[in-house]
Amino acid sequence: FFCLLTKSLLFAKHVDGAGKVDGSVVVALPIDRWSASEEVNSFEGHGGGLTFWDGKSSSGNPQEIKYETRSGDIAFIDRAVWHQANPITKGTRWAMVIFYKVL
């Protein structure tokens, strides 16, 4: 599916598919040049990206990994990895999300 991300929309911390999928692929699509100028929808300095919680830090808590996405970036996410789309502070972004199951 295609996902429109705006500053009022947040995909909070979750895992994908509740056991019905093996993982997901997220593709950061080029900026939306039709709804506003490149300056408004720029990826630079306006939040966004993905955060993952995987493994353990030295304190024993889940390790938090922040991944700043750019147009064309692809993230392969295992079904058991907690993650979220980080809030953006300006403009809109599009992502393509594909859920998959290994046969």
Image: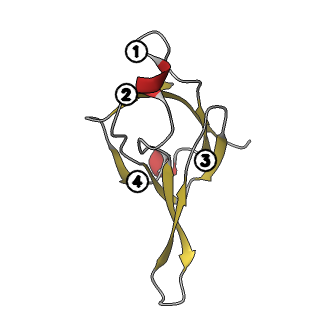
Q: CA distance from mark 4 to mark 2?
A: 24 Å
Q: Disc 1 marks which residue?
A: 36
Q: Disc 2 marks which residue?
A: 91
3 or 2: mark nearer the eye: 2
Q: Nearer the viewer, residue 24 or 34?
A: 34
4 or 2: mark nearer the eye: 2
Label 3's element? strand
Label 4 crowding class (10 Å Cα cut-off): few <14, some 14-19, many 20+?
A: some
Q: How is the image coloured?
A: secondary structure
Q: CA distance from mark 3 to mark 4?
A: 12 Å
Q: Disc 4 marks which residue?
A: 14
Q: CA distance from mark 1 to mark 2?
A: 8 Å
Label 2's element? loop
Q: Are marks 4 and 2 in contact (CB under 8 Å)?
A: no
Q: Earlier in the sequence, mark 3 or mark 4?
A: 4
Label 2 crowding class (10 Å Cα cut-off): few <14, some 14-19, many 20+?
A: many
Residue 27, horizontal then vertical, whole percent: 61, 34
Q: Disc 3 marks which residue?
A: 23
Q: Earlier in the sequence, mark 4 or mark 1?
A: 4
Label 1's element? loop
Q: CA distance from mark 3 to mark 2?
A: 28 Å
> Looking at the picture, which amino acid does disc 2 mark?
Gly
Q: Nearer the viewer, residue 13 or 89?
A: 89
Q: Earlier in the sequence, mark 1 or mark 3?
A: 3
> Looking at the picture, which amino acid does disc 3 mark?
Gly
Q: Work out whether 40 lies above or below 27.
A: above
Q: Are marks 4 and 1 in contact (CB under 8 Å)?
A: no
